[in-house]
Image (cartoon, rainbow, N blue to C red):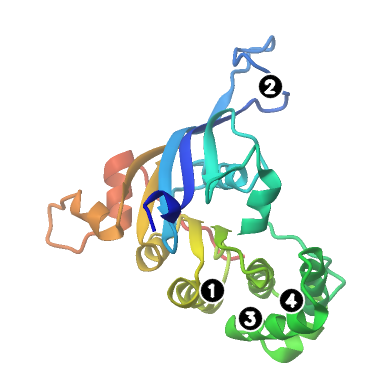
Amino acid sequence: MNREAEIALEVSGVTKRFVKGEKLHWPWRRSGNGRKPIVAVDNVSFRVQRGEVFGILGPNGSGKSTLVRCIATLLIPDEGTITVFGHDVLREEMAVKRLINRVSVEASFFKKLTPMENLLYGARLYGLGAKEARRRILEILTRLGLKREDAFRPMEEMSRGMQQKVAIARAFLTQPILLLLDEPTTGLDPRSKREVQAFVRELRDTHDATILLTTHDMQEADVLCDRVAILDEGRIVALDTPEGLKAQVSRADAGEMTLEDVFMELTGKRLREEEVG
């Protein structure tokens, strides 16, 4: 297989701007009310190889979710191109949608329905048979730490952590070859976070899936990702393996280097972990 055939995702010169509270049109100039565009993603470029877990590490507001929405065809980049296994996200939107699935912090469900009913509904949208889908749903939910009976009680009775596991199960049910995990463990309790991270490791090790993971959890990025891009104010300020990033920064003391040390050295900022509500 040649190198080009191994590229799962290519992001080239992508920029996305917004103007708060109003529509924005070309050219990007100050509007009459004095507002200027906010650059959420600023000339971002990277490649992700097939089978890789690629992390985007940055604080809230750094542009991570905007970038993922562009990749997922939910937003249109103002500049640059994005291809998924050679398919352009703008010109070949339906082809891209068949190859990807996305998990986000704000995953939505029919809350009165059970996980099984929600997931069977999603499976039918992708043309999966009910019998096979039911078997796979129970298998995935069990691997994520849910009990069989949990699959048959209303979503509204479930904790935030359990609902997030159902969101991950829904995304993986269609067996996407590019899985976009946008802050998948934010707000989870420690046990749920470990179970989700273990499932991501299992996907990495046993399935032909490429994973793009956004996070502001340094330890999560360190243990799960093959390579990490550090994003600050919409720009990539560093990209390497976790060990390679840590090797770029020296410490005055003899303590072990962390990705937070790297981030602070490169940006002068601290990554903040959200409180579990």
Residue 273 can be seen, yes or no: yes
Q: Quadrant of the N terminus?
A: bottom left
At label 3, which amino acid type do we have? Ile
Which residue lies at the image location 55% right of the left edge and 65% below the top edge? 185
Q: CA distance from mark 4 to mark 1?
A: 16 Å
The answer to which quarter of the image holds residue 43 is: top left
Q: Quadrant of the C terminus?
A: bottom right
Q: Earlier in the sequence, mark 4 or mark 1?
A: 4
Left or right: residue 78 versus residue 21 is left
Q: CA distance from mark 1 to mark 2?
A: 38 Å
Q: Earlier in the sequence, mark 3 or mark 1?
A: 3
How many residues crowd around disc 1 within 10 Å: few (fewer than 14), some, or many (20 or more)? many
Residue 121 is tagged as none
How many residues crowd around disc 2 within 10 Å: few (fewer than 14), some, or many (20 or more)? some
What secondary structure is found at the residue carrying circle 3? helix
Q: Earlier in the sequence, mark 1 or mark 2?
A: 2
At label 1, which amino acid type do we have? Val
Q: Which residue is mark 1?
A: 196
Q: Which residue is mark 4?
A: 158
Foreground mark, 4 or 1, reads: 1
Residue 116 in percent (x, y) is at 79, 79
Q: Earlier in the sequence, mark 3 or mark 2?
A: 2
Foreground mark, 4 or 2, reads: 2
What secondary structure is found at the residue carrying circle 4? loop
Residue 237 in percent (x, y) is at 34, 39
From the viewer's perspective, is residue 70 above or below residue 189? above
Q: Which residue is mark 3?
A: 140
Residue 24 is tagged as 2
Residue 156 in percent (x, y) is at 80, 72
Left or right: residue 206 versus residue 252 is right
Left or right: residue 274 versus residue 253 is right
At label 2, which amino acid type do we have? Leu
